[in-house]
Amino acid sequence: MQTKSLFPLAATLCFVTFPVQAAAPPSASQLRADCKAFVTAPGSAPGGRCAAYIQGFLDGSAAASKPLPGAPAAAAKPETFAERAARTRVRGRDTYPPRASAAVCVAASVPTAQVVAEVNAHLDTNPPAAGDSAASAVHTALLAGFPCKPAPR
């Protein structure tokens, strides 16, 4: 009886690569359906997708607002007199409106169910169109429900 070594087969399988594709992001309509399911059955697959998407969005927002590890700190460029005058003293300040913040401020203590409820409420009053992305729908909902407070001057 002749035995063959399985080593060549095992070695070959170690070097075979399998293509991995990222899942396509959900549409705003799909996220709305998943978040509706979260209200009635948080442990269901659609409810879990809703909670995971929103938590991932919040984690990504928090990570994006922090500097990259090892990156040099950006030196703040001082504002010139002309820039400050244009910002504060020029008539018709509406030509220099304050910048809208893209940041959302959801405290870590806020439960996921409350964030999902805010997204659901926003999507109920502003139903998504056919091609709307879930990311823009969640961002708009969180900006409305959890805006950042301006820093005191």
Image: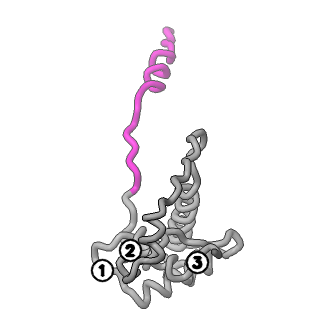
- How far apart marks 3 and 2 lie (CA) works out to 16 Å
Label 1–label 2 contact, CB within 8 A: yes
Q: Is residue 120 above or below residue 2?
A: below
* Picture quarter with the C terminus: bottom right
Q: In the current view of this chain or complex, which residue is farthest to the right?
A: 109
The magenta segment = 1-23
Tell me the crowding category of disc 1: few under 14, some 14 to 19, or many 20 or more residues within 10 angstroms, Cα based.
few
Residue found at the far bottom of this picture = 125
- Hey, what amino acid is under mark 1? Ala
Q: Quadrant of residue 133?
A: bottom left
Which residue carries the number 1 mark? Answer: 129
Which residue is at the front of the view, 134 or 30?
A: 134
Instruction: Locate residue 135, reporting x and y percent.
Output: 42, 68
Of 76 and 144, nearer the camera is 76
Give the residue type at disc 3: Val
| Residue indicated by mark 2 | 28
Outermost residue on the top side: it is 2
> Eyeballing the image, is 26 above or below 111?
above
Question: Which residue shows up at 55% across the image and 48% down it?
Answer: 75
Disc 3 and disc 1: Cα gap in Å?
21 Å
Question: In this rendering, would 51 be left or right of 99?
Answer: right
Disc 3 element: helix
Residue at the (71%, 72%) spot, across then down: 109
Q: Which residue is mark 3?
A: 115
